[in-house]
């Protein structure tokens, strides 16, 4: 631990704060967190947190979700500008208009969307539970999946359930290409390829496993291989190397480099974490009625996902 990390840990205790961090955060931030995980695990942790403050090291829609499921706890995000290209791709007025034109539509919203979009959706899903959620939807409903087209197509392939797709994508994951992954596969022929479902179909087809970031840890732990090619944001490699230090993790390259950094996730720094703990700012605040409207589809997800 460096001195900054030690200061954060001491202050976290003094302030009765809990630090939740997504798998894409820097190694230094993961090391000071009370919990590191995927969007689903973080939602449960946020809901069950008993603290005076949740310091959320992730992006804006994740901190919003934490506030919605735990409205009485103060939620702080080190940088409020930490957005997401998927959340940006889907605006609530356009979605509302589409719903109005198609009244039999059942909207499944990937958690990577704004609270306004969640509030007019029927159920939320994450990459960790999307298959389970879609399988529970009444057969007579027409499903619209928002906002990630690639994740939606993967769910459709796996469940056989036809769905209309919103045309959003993750700007990090679409940088992986059939060429770039084929090249690395040739270099490490014995290493299974593990890809996030936000990747394109051409990349998913080359993967031995397609799963959420949390499931990547389980897959690599249970698989006897010693080396794995990891096709997702670079922070995931820190989590895997910490959990499974005896195994080797090779970053899946894009066409240009092996540096798949999400610029939003990387807006959080140790310095900002310390300042947020000291000041309790910037706080995530949301209108109460929006919070309440967005809660129902999230609760449905948490409920369906448990059973
Ligand atoms: P996970 O829920 O699999 O961690 O994915 C979140 C995300 O933002 C992927 O880009
Ligand atoms: Fe959004 Fe992609 Fe960043 Fe995940 S990696 S937060 S989907 S922009």
Image: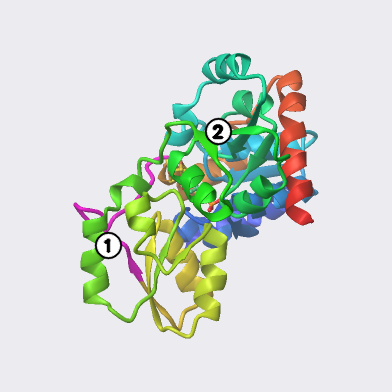
- Answer above or below: position of 276 versus 48: above
Of tags 1 and 2, the one toward the viewer is: 1
Q: Quadrant of residue 95?
A: top right
Task: Provide the residue span drawn in magenta.
Answer: 250-264
Label 2 CB less than 8 angstroms from ligand 2: no
SS class of the residue under badge 2?
A: loop
Q: Is residue 11 visible?
A: no
Count numbered badges in the picture. Answer: 2
What mark, if any, has residue 214 been given in the picture?
none
Label 2 sits on residue = 113
SS class of the residue under badge 1?
A: helix
**Image quadrant occupied by the C terminus:** bottom right
What mark, if any, has residue 181 been given in the picture?
1
Residue 64 image position (x, y, % from top left): 63, 34
Residue 21 image position (x, y, % from top left): 57, 52
Residue at x-position 76% and y-position 21% = 288
User: Are circles 1 and 2 on residues that touch, CB within 8 Å?
Assistant: no
Q: Quadrant of residue 68?
A: top right
Residue at x-position 42% and y-position 69% = 208
Based on the picture, tell me whether residue 223 belongs to the magenta stretch. Answer: no
Q: Earlier in the sequence, mark 1 or mark 2?
A: 2
Residue at x-position 51% and y-position 55% = 29
Image check: 184 left or right of 92? left
Q: Which SS does the magenta portion mostly show?
A: loop
Q: Is residue 39 visible?
A: yes
Crowding at mark 2 (Cα within 10 Å: few <14, some 14-19, many 20+): many
Residue 117 image position (x, y, % from top left): 60, 26
Image check: 50 left or right of 239? right
Using the image as rendered, state which of residue 197 and residue 44 is in the foreground.
Answer: 197
Residue 51 image position (x, y, % from top left): 77, 47
- Answer above or below: position of 282 versus 199: above
């Amino acid at each position: 631990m460096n001195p900054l990390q030690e200061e954060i840990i001491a202050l976290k205790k003094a302030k009765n704060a809990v630090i939740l961090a997504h798998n894409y955060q820097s190694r230094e931030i993961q090391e000071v967190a009370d919990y590191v995980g995927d969007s689903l695990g973080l939602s449960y942790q946020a809901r069950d947190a008993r603290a005076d403050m949740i310091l959320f090291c992730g992006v804006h829609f994740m901190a919003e979700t934490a506030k919605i499921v735990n409205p009485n706890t103060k939620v702080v995000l080190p940088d409020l500008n930490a957005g997401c290209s998927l959340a940006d791709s889907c605006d609530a007025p356009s979605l509302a208009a589409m719903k109005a034109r198609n009244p039999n539509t059942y909207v499944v919203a990937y958690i990577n969307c704004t609270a306004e979009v969640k509030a007019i959706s029927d159920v939320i899903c994450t990459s960790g539970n999307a298959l389970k959620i879609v399988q529970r939807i009444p057969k007579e409903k027409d499903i619209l999946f928002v906002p990630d087209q690639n994740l939606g197509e993967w769910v459709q392939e796996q469940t056989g359930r036809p769905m209309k797709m919103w045309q959003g994508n993750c700007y990090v994951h679409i940088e992986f290409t059939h060429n770039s992954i084929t090249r690395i596969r040739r270099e490490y022929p014995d290493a299974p390829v593990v890809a996030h479902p936000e990747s394109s179909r051409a990349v998913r087809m080359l993967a031995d496993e397609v799963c959420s970031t949390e499931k990547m840890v389980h897959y690599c732990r249970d698989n006897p291989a010693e080396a794995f090619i990891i096709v997702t944001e670079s922070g995931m490699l820190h989590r895997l190397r910490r959990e499974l230090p005896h195994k080797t993790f090779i970053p899946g390259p894009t066409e240009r480099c092996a540096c798949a950094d999400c610029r939003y996730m990387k807006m959080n720094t140790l310095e900002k974490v310390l300042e947020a703990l000291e000041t309790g700012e910037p706080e995530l605040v949301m209108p109460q009625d929006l919070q309440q409207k967005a809660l129902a589809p999230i609760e449905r997800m948490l409920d369906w996902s448990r059973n």
